[in-house]
Image (cartoon, rainbow, N blue to C red):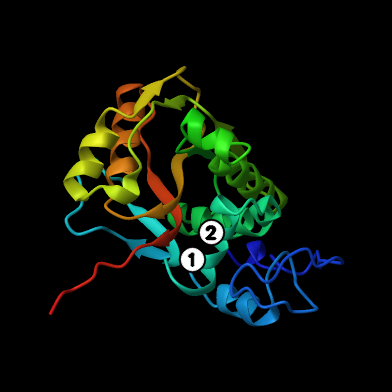
Amino acid sequence: MRDLRGVWSDLTDLVLPAGCAGCAERAPDLRQGFCPRCVGELESLRPAPTRPDPAPPGLPPCVALGPYAGALRHGLLAYKERGRHGLARPLGALLAEVVAGAVGPRQAVTLVAVPDTARAARARYGDHLDRLARHAADRLRAAGWPVRVLRPLRALPRPDSVALDSAGRAAAAEAAFRLRRAGGADGSVVLLDDIVTTGATLAAVSRVLRDAGMTPNAAAVLAATQKRHHQ
């Protein structure tokens, strides 16, 4: 996995259209949208297994880069909700590290991103996870990994998950995806998502793919939400 490091070394923002994606500070030396302090915070993260509690049936082993907090959280929000599409490159490269951590030694992998609904893709000027998947694949290929990116699924309209509890998320996810076409997967099949909360979406996607003969070996996500314990 070390050969996937160096995410920040090849591009420095020459123009400052916005503040740091991680902390909003207007630093003069942004690197791919992040200030040096937030770059250091992101570089310190290491992929690790994560699992919601309780985990929904059918959820494959899941690996996350870090908790949904700090520079990672703010960077994802800037990318998804504030139109900073240039962040797809560094975030996709970080996602490549998670893929490597999820499957182990270098091998052939097939990446399948959780698809956006048509409405979300219009609002974001494209499928945000598809962009991340393509940048992750580029980073893996540059490190010598054989990679395929498949888009076998389409997402049906569903309620905004932010307004749903865990039961509502599970019910919405269960009927949210349909198979567009069966794909020819090579090696390990890895699901990609940006954030895992209850795991309902990843479990639902996994079931659809399994029924199509493409059982996922793992799921790779950038961030995992932390369960709050009420006192």
Q: Residue 112, position in %: x, y?
A: 49, 36
Work out how far the residue at label 2 is from the one at label 1, CA to CA, in angstroms. Answer: 5 Å
| Residue type pointed to by label 2 | Leu
Q: Residue at x 57, y 33 (%)?
A: 122
Where, quadrant-wise, is the C terminus in this rendering?
Answer: bottom left
Q: Is residue 2 left or right of residue 171?
A: right
Is residue 171 visible in the rendered structure shown here?
yes
According to the picture, the residue beneath numbered tag 2 turns out to be 76
Dividing the picture into quadrants, the one containing residue 153 is top left
Q: Quadrant of residue 79?
A: bottom right
Quarter of the image for residue 9 reads bottom right
**Residue in the picture at 45% in, 25% down:** 154
Q: Is residue 108 visible?
A: no
Q: Position of residue 140 (x, y in %)?
A: 64, 50
Q: Which type of secondary structure does the marked residue at label 1 adopt? A: helix
Q: Which residue is mark 1?
A: 73
Q: Is residue 167 above or below residue 71?
A: above
The x, y position of residue 104, in whole percent, is: 47, 56
Which residue is pictured at 23% across the width and 70% down the height? 228
Residue at horizontal 63 percent and vertical 38 percent from the top:
125
Question: Which residue sits furthest bottom?
Answer: 37
Looking at the rendered structure, the secondary structure element under dot 2 is helix
